[in-house]
Image (cartoon, rainbow, N blue to C red):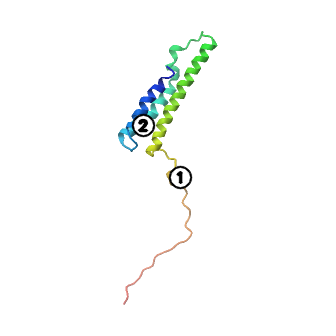
Amino acid sequence: MALQPGKSFAMTAFMLWMSGSGVHPFSIMITFYAVYNPIKSAFTVNSVFKPFSDPKADTMINAALLTAKATFVALNLVAMCGALYKMNTMGLLPNTPSDWSSFLKVPPPVQFSSGSVISAPL
């Protein structure tokens, strides 16, 4: 059960590769699901491992269950990093200085000029 995100990431990675690097509705949809599913899965880790938990078990079994949960979450993070890499190759992540140029403060003008009316020669 702990290795299930790794198995599903193999299929997701294949789908990400097949969708191409262009910004098209299909590739954006596949990339969105590649980011969304690991996050959703990581937040439901306790419900996934609920059948394996036993409050009367000794500490060794609980430690093994904790290791399995940590592996489950770590593989979900690996899957999400793969999706974020795909978003980076598509150009959807703002990671260059030019992506943030709209937040730069516009400096005040140093000089001022005005136009004049030029009359036609007589």
* Label 1 neighbour load within 10 Å: few <14, some 14-19, many 20+: few
Q: Amino acid at mark 1?
A: Pro
Residue 76 position in % (x across, y down): 50, 29
Mark 2 or mark 1, earlier in chain:
2
- Give the residue number, with chain letter if any, for mark 1: 97
Picture coordinates of residue 2 (x, y %)?
51, 21
Which residue position holds label 2? 31
Figure check: 122 above or below 10: below
The picture quadrant where one finds residue 111 is bottom right
Residue at the location (45% across, 25% down)? Answer: 7
Residue 95 position in % (x across, y down): 52, 47
Res 17 quadrant in image? top left
x and y percent of residue 47 in the render? 50, 20
Given residues 63 and 42, the one toward you in this image is: 63
Q: Residues within 10 Å of mark 2 (few under 14, many from 20)?
A: many
Report how far apart the C-alphas of labels 2 and 1 lie in the structure: 24 Å
Image: 97 above or below 52: below
- Identified at 60% across, 13% down, the residue is 61
Q: Residue at x 42, y 80 (%)?
A: 117
Q: Residue at x 42, y 31 (%)?
A: 12
Check disc 2 and give the amino acid type. Thr
Q: Quadrant of residue 73?
A: top right
Taking 84 as reference, is 62 left or right?
A: right
